[in-house]
Every structure is written in C-alpha cells, then in structure tokens.
Amino acid sequence: MRSRTLFFILVVAVAVSFLGLLFFGFEGGLGGRGHGMGAEVPQSFWLVLFVVPLVVVVVVLGYALVFPELTDEKPKPKPSSMPTVEKEESALDAVLRVLNEDERNVIETLVAGGGTMMQKDIRWKTGLSRVKTHRILFRLAQRGIVSAEKYYNTNKITLADWLTRKSTSAR
C-alpha cells in the first residue's frame, strides 16, 4: 500500500516538474510570451514549479531507501504451548528451560516437596512475598504447569501430571 502511494507522489511530482521546466525553458510556455492572455507569470514561478517537485522526488526516494517497506510475510506459527522435549530430556527439564528464575525456583521447590505443597509453604521455602508467590502460581496455573485447589485458608498446589510422568520412549 505504501509503495503505491509513494509511486503516485513520484509520478505527480515528476509531471509537475516537467511542466515547470517546459514553461521556464520556453519563457512562458510553448507559444511564446503571453499572446495577449492578460497578466504575465514571472519566470521565477516556473523555476519554483520545476525545482520544488524535484526536491519532493529526492525526499520521497530518500525516505523509501532509509525506511524500506516491510514485507507481507506470514508470521511464523507460534510454538505449541507445550514445550518440545528432546531425547533423553524429561518434560520437567524442558519446562524449566523456559521459565524465569522465580518460576523455576517455585517449580523446583514443588518437585523437592514431592509434587504437592501448600501455597504458604512454597512462599516460606522460596522466600518470596505472599503476592509474588500468588502471581507466579497464577501464571503457572494458566499455562497448565500447576493446579491449585482451595485448602482452608491457603491453596494446595500440585504439579501437572504430564510433568511428573516418566518418559515412556525407548532408549
């Protein structure tokens, strides 16, 4: 779309510049001076009419070179929400590779606790604030890495089954 607009601007500017050159070069146009057409247009007007569009052409070409148009390439498909597991790598290791430091700390604490812990215990063992622990666990639950179940005045946090299963692929 942008290239068509720039091309149109270039064509119009070149046409106007050619007209200005024509009238400037032949002193009032192809028919000579005036021919009784009333007020005569000064020659400096035709010079301006020739030069200004040329400046526009240079500016448009410079803009097109400095800021090339982005191509309409289709975006690459997003990787699936489940991380890919390399050979000899468990699903847990694959997940740990893509988590930030605090999320990784929470998951490692859960693994050390057998896969299920109370939210307040996770908070205590990781040293994170109550709000930060809640936000991290909320993000992990949205991604399907953990699940939360209400348990009195706290939550019981459990690692997802697909993380705790052992790989069944043959070695």
Image: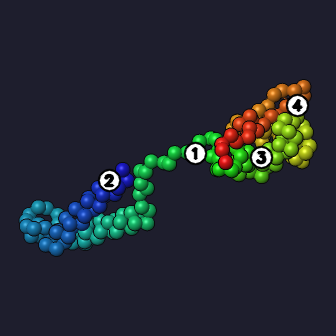
Callout 3–callout 2 Cβ contact below 8 Å: no
Which element is circle 1 on? Answer: loop
Q: Is residue 72 left or right of residue 137?
A: left
Distance between mark 1 and mark 4 Cα atoms: 34 Å
Q: Residue 79, labelled with which disc?
A: 1
Which element is circle 2 on? Answer: helix
Distance between mark 3 and mark 1 Cα atoms: 20 Å
Q: Which residue is mark 2?
A: 4
Distance between mark 1 and mark 2 Cα atoms: 35 Å
Three-letter code, disc 4? Thr
Q: Residues within 10 Å of mark 3 (few under 14, many from 20)?
A: some
Q: Is residue 131 above or below residue 60?
A: above
Coloring scheme used: rainbow
Which element is circle 4 on? Answer: strand
Which residue appears at 41% of the width and 50% of the height? 72
Tag in front: 1 or 2: 1
Tag in front: 1 or 4: 1
Residue 51 seen: yes
Sequence-wise, which precedes: disc 3 or disc 4?
3
Which residue appears at 82% of the width and 38% of the height? 115
Q: Which residue is mark 3?
A: 103
Distance between mark 4 and mark 2 Cα atoms: 61 Å
Q: Is residue 55 left or right of residue 38?
A: right
Q: Position of residue 36 (x, y in %)?
A: 8, 63
Q: Position of residue 100 (x, y in %)?
A: 74, 51
Tag in front: 3 or 1: 1
Three-letter code, disc 3? Glu
Three-letter code, disc 2? Arg
Q: Residue 154, labelled with which disc?
A: 4
Which residue appears at 71% of the width and 46% of the height? 90
